[in-house]
Image (spheres, rainbow, N blue to C red):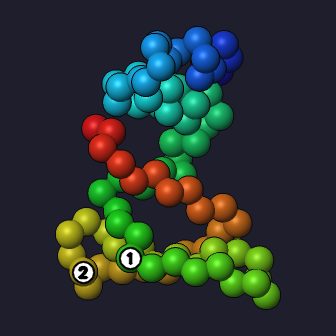
Amino acid sequence: MGNEGLNLTTLLVGSYSGAPEILKYFKGIADNYGLRKYIRLQHKIVGAFWDEQDQQWHVKVQRGDNPEDVFEDKGHVLVNASGVLK
């Protein structure tokens, strides 16, 4: 994979990094670890809860802007990746 040397300390400059540097870092990590196949853009989490018995997150996901287009999924990890990065 192409970004083996990619790390936060060498990529980010100054005390506070801007959105372009942070986005570049996130994209590099996603590429380096083959995570893009798990990322869904233009989706919104409309509900999530941790189920102790299943030991998993149960998540309701809305596709696009249609509030009627919702599906359910579950997983062991839930990453809050909301923010201003574009």
Query: Mark 1: which amino acid?
Result: Val
Nearest the camera: 35 or 23? 23
Q: Position of residue 83 (x, y in %)?
A: 36, 48
Q: Is residue 49 above or below residue 7?
A: below
| Identity of the residue drawn at 30% across and 57% down | 42
Which residue, given by chain and number where applicable, does mark 1 sit on? Answer: 46
**Camera sees residue 2:** no
Q: Position of residue 1 (x, y in %)?
A: 65, 21
State which mark lies toward you, 2 or 1.
1
In the shown orientation, is residue 1 left or right of residue 31?
right
**Camera sees residue 28:** yes
Local packing at callout 2 (Cα closer than 10 Å; few below 14, some 14-19, many 20+) is few
| Identity of the residue drawn at 38% across and 76% down | 46
Check if mark 2's residue and mark 1's residue have beta carbons within 8 Å. Answer: yes
In the shown orientation, is residue 11 left or right of residue 43?
right
Nearest the camera: 74 or 49? 49
- State the SS at label 2: loop
Q: Position of residue 51 (x, y in %)?
A: 69, 84
Which mark, by number, is residue 77?
A: none
Q: Residue furthest front?
A: 15
In the rendered image, the quadrant that contains the C terminus is top left
| Identity of the residue drawn at 31% across and 69% down | 63
Which residue, given by chain and number where applicable, does mark 2 sit on? Answer: 67
| Identity of the residue drawn at 70% across and 66% down | 76
